[in-house]
Image (cartoon, rainbow, N blue to C red):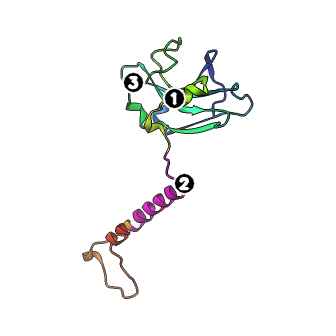
Amino acid sequence: VQAAPQQVAEDKFVFDLPDYENINHVVVFMLGTIPFPEGMGGSVYFCYPDQSGMAVWQLLGFVTNEKPSAIFKISGLKSGKGSQHPFGAMNLPQTPTVAQIGISVELLDNLAQQTPVASAAVSSVDSFTEFTQKMLDNFYNFASSFAVTQAQMTPNPSEAFIPANVVLKW
């Protein structure tokens, strides 16, 4: 947890993300000690150095007093293109060595008009459906690990064999 941002302007803050290549998701949340001013919220940006070392900024989404936390998937963003961002005029290093999360305090009306990178959104499938899918994938992988060919089967009247394709079809 990083609770001490670097303030780069009156309304802009950045957090460093060392070892960002091994990070899949980022959780951004307000601590509850200082709310946004009335009518304001925070745009959340992800910045990483591209192959040439230039900073690439991408809009992930936003947090507000009414929506004080969000989870963003950043693992697929590291090869994408940048977008327009409010950090361009800042005197941030243009050749960052670590990734950064940027928070820009903006009017709620402006936040509603912004379009975040689509691949940053966390799955919208409800958690029960997601759990069920993962559980069944795990079950199939587990059952498949015991697979034997017909030539390897030894007759045993007390065991029943179920073809793997039946489980897969189910």
Mark 3 vs 1: CB contact within 8 A: no
The type of residue carrying mark 1 is Gln
Residue projecting furthest to the right: 33
Which numbered mark, 3 or 2, is in the foreground of this view?
2
SS class of the residue under badge 3?
loop
The type of residue carrying mark 2 is Ser
Rendered location of residue 83, percent (x, y): 43, 24
The span shown in magenta is 123-143
Q: Is residue 130 magenta?
A: yes
Q: Nearer the viewer, residue 22 or 90?
A: 90
SS class of the residue under badge 2?
helix
**According to the image, label 2 marks what residue?**
127
**According to the image, label 3 marks what residue?**
50
- Mark 3 / mark 2, whichever is N-terminal: 3
- Mark 3 / mark 1, whichever is N-terminal: 3
Q: Main secondary structure of the magenta part?
A: helix
Which numbered mark, 3 or 1, is in the foreground of this view?
1
Q: Is residue 107 above or below residue 163?
A: above
Is residue 75 among the parts visible in the rendering? Answer: no
Rendered location of residue 56, percent (x, y): 43, 23
Q: Residue 5, located in which quarter of the rendered image?
A: top right
The type of residue carrying mark 3 is Asp
Q: Is residue 145 magenta?
A: no
Is residue 48 among the parts visible in the rendering? Answer: yes
**According to the image, label 1 marks what residue?**
113
Distance CA(mark 3)–CA(mark 2):
34 Å
